[in-house]
Image: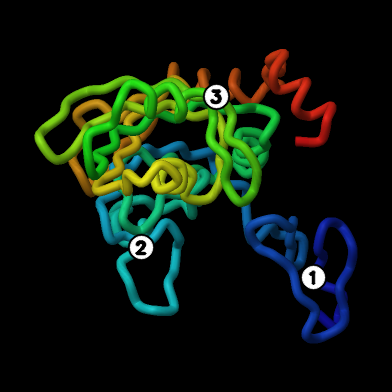
Amino acid sequence: MTAGAVTVNGRVIRELGSKADPEQDHIKVSGKLINPKQPKVYLMLNKPREVVTTLSDPQGRVTVKNLLRGVRARVYPVGRLDYDSEGLLLLTNDGELVQKILHPSFEVPKTYEVKVKGVLTDEEIRMLSKGVELSDGRTLPCQIRKIEKTEKNSWLEMTIHEGRNRQIRRMLEAIDHPVLKLKRTRMGRLELGALPVGEYRYLTAQEIKSLKVLGAGPRTLSAGRRIRKAVGE
C-alpha cells in the first residue's frame, strides 16, 4: 500500500488501515482486480420454521445460509420471513434489484397460507380485507379467502401488498385470532410449488425476467392509496 500498488475505485490508497467493501468496491493490487464481479444469482428457498432470515446469528441459531449448500456466491435474502414462519424466500446478489423490489412504491403482492385460532366470521373476513388499524397505521386492502375450517381453527389464503414487520400476525391479533401457522406461497409471479421444505432451487430465465420487469418501475398507485398519501395517512 505504501508503494501505491493498491487502488480502490480507481484511487490510489496508501494509508495503512484504510477500509473497503470487497462486495461493492473495485479493488486492484498492482493492476490486478482482486474481486472480479460475480455473475448474478437468483435462488428460491423453502424456509423452514425456526430458521433465521439472516446470514449469521449471534445466538447461534440456524440461518438461511446454513441451508444453501453448494451455493458459492454470497447471496442475500430479499425481505424477511419471521423465525416461526416458513415458505418462499428469494435470495440474490443483485443488490440493485433488491432495493427496487423492497421499495414501498412497488407494492409487490405476497400470498400466504395462514392457520389461525378460532373460526373467522364473514364480517371479520370483510374487515381484514378492507384494512385494519395497527400501531403504525391502517393496512392497505388485501385479498382473503377461506381455504378450510375445523371446529376450532381456520385456514386462510391472504395476499398483501405491503412489507410491514409481522403484518399478517398483527392484523389477525387485532381481531383476536392469533396465527398458529404461516407459510408464504407466492411472491409476485414466483410460486413455491412443490419445492421441499429446507431445499432451494435456481430461478428459471422466465422467473428472473419477471423479477426484472417487476423492478423496472413502480406500479400505478390505486385511487385509494393516492388519497391516503395525500392526506398523510
The image shows residue 129 at horizontal and vertical percentages of 47, 24
Real-space Cα separation, disc 1 to disc 2, in angstroms: 35 Å
Decide which of 45, 32 is in the foreground and name it. Answer: 45
Q: Look at mark 2 in the image and give the residue it sits on.
A: 63
Kind of residue at disc 1: Val
- Tell me, yes or no, if residue 41 can be seen here: yes
Read off the residue under disc 1: 6
Q: Residue at x 54, y 40 (%)?
A: 39
What secondary structure is marked by label 1? strand
Q: Sequence-wise, which precedes: disc 1 or disc 2? A: 1
Characterize the local packing of mark 3: few (<14), some (14-19) or many (20 or more) Cα atoms within 10 angstroms.
some
How would you rate the neighbour count of disc 1 (Cα within 10 Å): few for under 14, some for 14-19, many for 20 or more?
some
Which residue is rendered at x = 57% and y = 46% of the image? 134
Tell me the element at label 3.
Answer: loop
The quadrant in which residue 96 appears is top right
Q: Nearer the viewer, residue 1 or 221?
A: 221
Question: Marks 2 and 1: in contact by CB < 8 Å?
Answer: no
Q: Which badge, 3 or 2, is on the more N-terminal residue?
A: 2
Name the outermost residue toward the left: 151
